[in-house]
Image (tube, grey):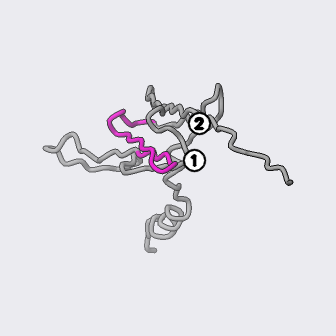
Amino acid sequence: MTLIPRKYYLDDFFDNFLSVPEESHMKCDIYEKGGNYHIEMDIPGFNKQDIAIECNKGYLTITAEKKNEQEDKDEERNYIRRERTYGKYQREFYLGDVEADKVKAEFKEGILKITVPKKTEIDTKKVIEIE
């Protein structure tokens, strides 16, 4: 009887089949309150320095990147299992025409909070009477 590891049969299939999209690593809530849009995003395991926020042409882009830096470079590690992921994650939201210089962000205990002031819309509608 030959023993073939289970990994040979199913794990590769399920690893690819059940892979999680990158955006699911950065779950968020978006709500409106007090004339502002608020985005609260979970980014656990990252430091403030690992996160970049950019507002460009109406799009708010949030990028979190963690590089795999092996702490014990002198020791060779023989991992049994590695589940902690490293890499680059990104989410993008369309905000429309906003004043980018008034966007504020705060990162505390793995939660990124972004406040985007709503742009006050001036009523440019003019009714023209027919003569």
The residue identified by callout 2 is: 119
- Picture coordinates of residue 75 (x, y %)? 16, 44
- Picture coordinates of residue 19 (x, y %)? 52, 58
Label 1 Cα crowd, 10 Å radius (few <14 / some 14-19 / many 20+):
few
In the depicted view, which residue is nearer to us: 128 or 14? 128
Q: Is residue 6 left or right of residue 47?
A: right
- Picture coordinates of residue 13 (x, y %)? 52, 68
**Tag shown at residue 16:** none
Q: Which amino acid does label 1 sit on?
A: Gly
- Picture coordinates of residue 113 (x, y %)? 51, 31
Q: What residue type is labelled 2?
A: Lys
Residue furthest front in the image? 131
In reply to whether residue 58 is colored magenta, the answer given is: yes
In reply to whether residue 116 is colored magenta, the answer given is: no
Q: Is the residue under label 2 in contact with that under label 1 (CB below 8 Å)?
A: yes
In the depicted view, which residue is nearer to us: 84 or 5? 84
The residue identified by callout 1 is: 96
- The relative height of residue 111 versus residue 94 in the rendered view (above or below) is above
In the depicted view, which residue is nearer to us: 27 or 73? 27
Residue furthest right in the image? 131
Magenta span: 44-63
Disc 2, SS? loop
Label 2 Cα crowd, 10 Å radius (few <14 / some 14-19 / many 20+):
few
Disc 1, SS? loop
